[in-house]
Image (cartoon, rainbow, N blue to C red):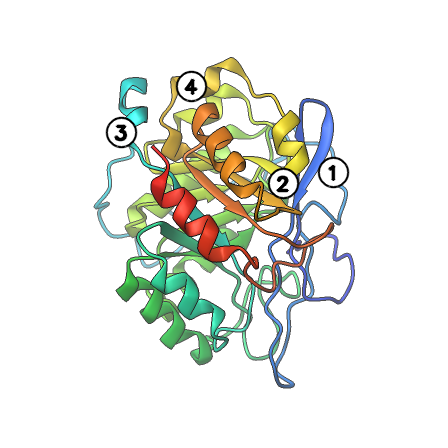
Amino acid sequence: MVTRPLCAAVPVAAMSLLIGGAALAFSPSAQAAPTAAASPSHCHTRSCPAPSPSPSSSSPSASPTSTSPTPAPSTSSPDPSPSPSDKNAVREHIITALYAWPTLSSWGQVESAAPTVSASIVDICAPDGSGSGCNGQPADAQAPVWLPTIAALETAGVTPLYYIATGYDQTPLATIEGEMQDAVNWYGLSNFFFDEESTNDQSYYKALYNYAIGLGAVQVVFNPGTMIPQSYMSFGRDEVQLVFEGTQSGFRSASFPSWLTDYPASEYYAALSVGTSAGVGTDISDAVADGIGNIYVDDEAEPPSYSTLPAFWSTEISDVAAAP
């Protein structure tokens, strides 16, 4: 779901990542309404080439508390990450990338997989099709059709992550904060998935992290589109960085910076496409060995739309649940 530029008017969200010099990618599917309801037109950084990271001096200037109402006191500490020794205490979990219409039965499968499924990205379009991952503009109204699904996810213990594209730091902080406030006011959501993270403006994303924590977030996920500098791991213990997105075979040949193991596995996420039932167990074992505590393996061909769960969903749940 790219906000700028829009690739095509198709309901596809795409994200790309560069690991070990190879272009990798992730594209959670867009929600496609079974009726004539508005559908998103977006593509993460997989379908849209990522622009060159802009220098921090060009990023919009805005206070991380520029919108009102003032964020409530945080219920989650923004203190630095726990000691690396705590990493092994974190079990493997699934963060689902399912960009499907909220009334489809696949959401029930996500809910029933908790607590193995700990979170799921939700890409919400307003009734008129507006939305950060829909037409590239902030949603201008609540989408009531999503309320029962959000409530069911939360009741099951799955954290909904509200999707927001940040435009590689070119979207003013005040605009992003307004979207975050809308998520709280319309859906009671304070946990976020920030797409299009610039790797050259740490202060911008630290401000978004702090603002989310002030709203009560317990999980804030970022998609950089490339490997982040190690300094980005200083946001706080509730941050998650997507460090791999691409094919199952690409994941097996990927290499990661040695400093990855300096931080808890819970702060990393890998999303795989073109997965197989026979290979998903190896993918999960590799993620554990690499210190990546969150994973999602889908079976769609490149570029994936992530409109459905993989055919081996039950196997993936079992394998993740059994991971050390």
Extreme-front residue of the structure: 278
Residue 96 in picture, x, y percent from top left:
48, 53
Above or below, 271 against 143 in this view is above
Tell me which numbered mark, 3 or 2, is placed earlier along the sequence: 3
Mark 4 packing: few (<14 Cα in 10 Å), some, or many (20+)?
some
Which amino acid type corresponds to the residue marked 3 in the rendered image? Ala
Q: Look at mark 3 in the image and give the residue it sits on.
A: 89
Q: Amino acid at mark 1?
A: Pro
Q: Say which element carries label 4.
A: helix
Return the mark for residue 261. 4
* Residue 207 position (above or below residue 99): above
Q: Which residue is mark 1?
A: 51
| 187 sits left or right of 299 in the view | left
Per the model, the C-alpha gap separating discs 4 and 3 is 13 Å
Q: Is residue 262 visible?
A: yes
* Extreme residue in the bottom direction: 35
